[in-house]
């Protein structure tokens, strides 16, 4: 599939279909790690909870042995089919290579907001047909319809059938298993980066565990949660595409709301740096310029600079009608 068409298919399906999964009550509750809702998924009857040292760490949010489960708002956009989805991403080329993970240091922002929603994310996927796409998405988002505010939230999504019947945001449906309390799916980021000043980042990675096949989500090396292999149909052998960058819907600003700084000043740009992937031997490798495409369909609205020698992209834009 042509990279441009593949990106359109993946991102368009994600933002036109995923909105129907939002639900009410914007809070979280602490639940026993062994009794969290995802473990009741019919495909996880025989799943053994993967416990690591992160699972046993003391937390200021939930008591030991419990994890926060975020609840989303109950509001559905009945006009989601008319949403205008734009992106600025660096995509690996879809070839025979399999990826067993991806990572980057991601700057966190909260631009003055208008539009529907905006996101900075790493997406891994596998599958050719719309119904066959398996996908995991993680990063940050500003989504007033989903969260009920204009704050920047840690946000995840998954699907095993092209965003049709399976998958959801965060822990709205059964699938994603929360492991660590300090960072949980749906948590607001506070503070965030300041333009020209202090930068706040997350060091995010996803790795397919070689023993279990589960997809492990970490921040600064600490396990946040994971997606069990059983809920996927084609990610079991790895991903064929990784996408790093931003997505904005209905004219929303992207990144920090500014075009990337021409002087490549990271304090004035939103960015992904230290971009890497996990190869077939489960070794971490830097992103190679020969293996990626810059994908920015509307450069008047949003831009992306690929700083190949720094393993970095800077991206963003003000959005609007442009």
Image: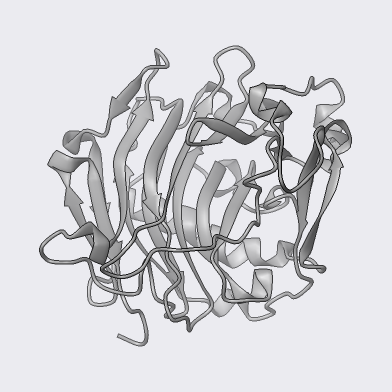
Q: Where is residue 230 in the image (x, y as percent from the top left)?
A: 71, 27
> In this picture, is 50 found above or below 104?
above
Horizontally, is 98 left or right of 274 in the view? right
**Which residue is at a point 53% across and 22% down the rendered structure image?**
237
Residue 156 picture location, percent across and down: 60, 50
Residue furthest left in the image: 263
Q: How many labels does the image show?
A: 0
Q: Quadrant of residue 311?
A: top left
Which quadrant: the N terminus?
Answer: top left
Residue 273 rendering spot, x and y as whole percentages:
29, 45
Q: Is residue 296 visible?
A: no
Q: In this view, does 114 lie above or below 9?
A: below
Image location (x, y in percent) of residue 243: 38, 46
For the C terminus, the quadrant is bottom left
Residue closest to the eye, 304 or 188:
188
| In the image: residue 240, left or right of residue 223 | left
Q: Which residue is at 73% across, 65% downward? A: 22
Classify residue 28 as left or right of residue 136: right
Q: Residue at x 50, y 27 (%)?
A: 207
Give the residue displayed 83% in from the left and 47% down from the top.
30
Q: Which of 249 and 57 is in front in this view?
A: 57
């Amino acid at each position: 599939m042509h990279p441009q068409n593949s990106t359109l298919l993946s991102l368009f399906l994600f933002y036109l279909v995923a909105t129907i999964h939002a639900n009410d009550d914007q809070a979280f509750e602490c639940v026993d790690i062994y009794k969290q809702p995802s473990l009741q998924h019919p495909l996880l009857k025989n799943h053994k909870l993967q416990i690591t040292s992160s699972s046993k760490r003391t937390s200021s949010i939930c008591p030991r042995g419990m994890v926060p489960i975020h609840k989303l708002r109950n509001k559905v956009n009945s006009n989601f089919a008319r949403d205008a989805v734009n992106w600025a991403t660096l995509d690996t080329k879809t070839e025979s290579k399999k990826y067993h993970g991806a990572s980057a240091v991601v700057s966190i922002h909260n631009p003055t907001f208008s539009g529907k929603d905006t996101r900075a994310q790493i997406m891994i996927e596998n599958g050719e047909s719309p119904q066959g796409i398996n996908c995991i998405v993680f990063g940050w988002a500003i989504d007033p319809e989903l969260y009920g505010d204009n704050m920047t939230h840690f946000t995840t999504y998954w699907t095993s059938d092209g965003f049709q019947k399976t998958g959801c945001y965060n822990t709205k449906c059964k699938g994603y298993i929360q492991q660590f309390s300090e960072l949980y799916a749906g948590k607001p980021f506070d503070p965030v980066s300041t333009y020209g000043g202090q930068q706040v980042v997350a060091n995010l990675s996803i790795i397919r565990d070689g023993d279990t096949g589960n997809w492990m989500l970490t921040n600064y090396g600490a396990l946040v949660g994971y997606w069990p292999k059983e809920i996927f149909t084609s990610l079991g052998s790895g991903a064929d595409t990784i996408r790093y960058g931003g997505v904005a819907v209905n004219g929303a600003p992207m990144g920090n709301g500014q075009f990337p700084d021409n002087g490549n000043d990271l304090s004035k740009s939103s960015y992904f740096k230290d971009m890497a992937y996990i190869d077939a031997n489960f070794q971490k490798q830097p992103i190679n310029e020969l293996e990626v495409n810059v994908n920015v369909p509307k450069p008047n609205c949003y831009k992306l600079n690929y700083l190949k020698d720094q393993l970095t992209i800077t991206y963003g834009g003000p959005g609007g009608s442009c």
